[in-house]
């Protein structure tokens, strides 16, 4: 079975943790352990978030006196793909002796007219107290919004339309590689309508929506989104909270999940299931094997038309 696995950014750097390389390496060791059993039995394509990492690089870039202007988000996204991809590739290589692992920096085509450029919603970087967040917003021209535990920077997150390197991903899979690609949703680019020339844009594409597009393009049998909760909850954080263990895309969409957290994940799995008729699931990293085998997480399955 061909499985596309989407790792949340918080699987690599947990909330409140210092963003040290050693901390991220320890977390990626956990990722490799969780995915090794799946990789022994199935063909894997792995993608990952980069919210904490790109936020860290953006802060460093903005504070660097050697730079006349900070690095744009698309270049920072490429840096995080290389960094996280290298950590994942080395760790999975060690966990899966004899298995070929390839990391590919990929670009994601978006529309220059996407309304998301006028309405930033994608959280990046660390959590700040309100007054510090407001001060940074004034100083650096950031947009900020309230997250579950504080205030964070938000940036545009346009809809992914096409992964530029899809053919290369197919070639790597056909050669027997475990492929790591589309990290952080891919480097966001627009294409010139006349020449096709690519230009990087100031945005971060949602990695779950890109994962759904990737899974559709590589004809995956299963889309697995791994996060820091065991399943999808209706009424999360309220006294009425209860788990959703099985749902169709239509049922999941009626949950009204927050745009900055579970909303994109719910939309991503719904799109994939609707467009392919295959299965998808959302759940905790440590339970990856159990989720694929129906013993954990939230399963999203096709709805059946009446007739």
Image (cartoon, rainbow, N blue to C red):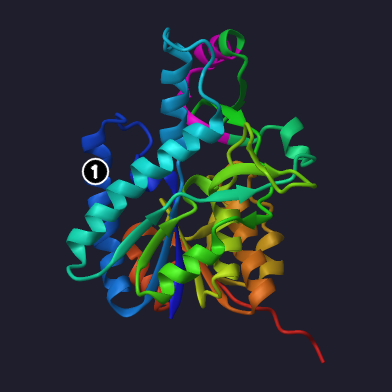
Vertical arrangement, residue 136 with respect to residue 15, above or below: above
Q: Position of residue 21 (x, y in %)?
A: 25, 35
* Residue at image point 50% right, 33% down: 75
* Residue at image point 48% right, 32% down: 76
Q: Position of residue 253 (x, y in %)?
A: 69, 60
Can you identify the residue that label 1 sits on?
Answer: 25
Q: Quadrant of the N terminus?
A: bottom left
Q: Secondary structure at mark 1?
A: helix
Q: Nearer the viewer, residue 104 or 49?
A: 104
Vertical arrangement, residue 170 with respect to residue 105, above or below: below
The magenta-colored residue range is 123-137
Q: Is residue 125 magenta?
A: yes
Q: Position of residue 154 (x, y in %)?
A: 60, 30
**Quadrant of the image occupied by residue 30:** bottom left
Tally of numbered tags:
1
* Residue at image point 59% right, 68% down: 217
Vertical arrangement, residue 60 with respect to residue 220, above or below: above
Q: 221 left or right of 41?
A: right
Q: Nearer the viewer, residue 180 or 261?
A: 180
Viewer can see residue 225? yes
Q: Is residue 268 magenta?
A: no
Q: Nearer the viewer, residue 192 or 275?
A: 192
**Quadrant of the image occupied by residue 12:** top left
Q: Nearer the viewer, residue 157 or 266?
A: 157
Vertical arrangement, residue 116 with respect to residue 173, above or below: above
* Residue at image point 60% right, 69% down: 216
Q: Quadrant of the C terminus?
A: bottom right
Viewer can see residue 245? no
Mark 1, other Cα within 10 Å: few <14 / some 14–19 / many ≥20: some
Q: Position of residue 113 (x, y in %)?
A: 80, 40
């Amino acid at each position: 079975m061909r499985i596309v696995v989407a790792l949340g950014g918080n699987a690599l750097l947990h909330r409140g943790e210092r963003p040290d390389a050693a901390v991220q390496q320890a977390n990626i060791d956990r990722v490799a352990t969780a995915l090794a059993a799946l990789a022994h039995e199935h063909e894997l394509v792995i993608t990952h978030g980069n919210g904490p990492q790109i936020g860290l690089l953006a802060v460093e870039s903005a504070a660097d006196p050697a730079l006349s202007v900070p690095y744009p988000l698309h270049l920072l996204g490429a840096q995080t793909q290389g960094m996280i991809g290298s950590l994942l590739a080395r760790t999975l290589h060690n966990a899966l002796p004899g298995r070929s692992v390839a990391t590919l920096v990929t670009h994601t085509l978006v529309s220059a007219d996407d309304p998301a450029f006028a309405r930033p919603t994608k959280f990046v970087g660390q959590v700040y107290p309100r007054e510090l967040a407001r001060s940074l917003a004034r100083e650096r021209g950031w947009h900020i919004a309230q997250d579950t535990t504080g205030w964070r920077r938000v940036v545009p997150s346009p809809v992914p339309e096409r992964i530029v390197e899809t053919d290369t991903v197919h070639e790597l899979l056909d050669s027997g590689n475990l492929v790591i690609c589309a990290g952080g949703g891919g480097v966001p680019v627009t294409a010139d309508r006349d020449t096709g020339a690519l230009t990087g844009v100031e945005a971060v594409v949602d990695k779950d929506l890109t994962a759904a597009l990737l899974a559709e393009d590589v004809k995956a049998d299963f889309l697995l989104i791994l996060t820091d909760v065991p399943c999808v909850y209706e009424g999360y954080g309220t006294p009425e909270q209860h788990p959703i263990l099985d749902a169709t895309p239509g049922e999941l969409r009626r949950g009204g999940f927050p745009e900055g957290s579970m909303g994109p994940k719910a939309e991503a799995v719904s799109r994939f299931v609707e467009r392919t008729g295959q299965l998808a699931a959302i759940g905790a990293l440590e339970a990856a094997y159990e989720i694929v085998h129906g013993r954990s997480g939230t399963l999203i399955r096709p709805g059946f038309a009446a007739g």
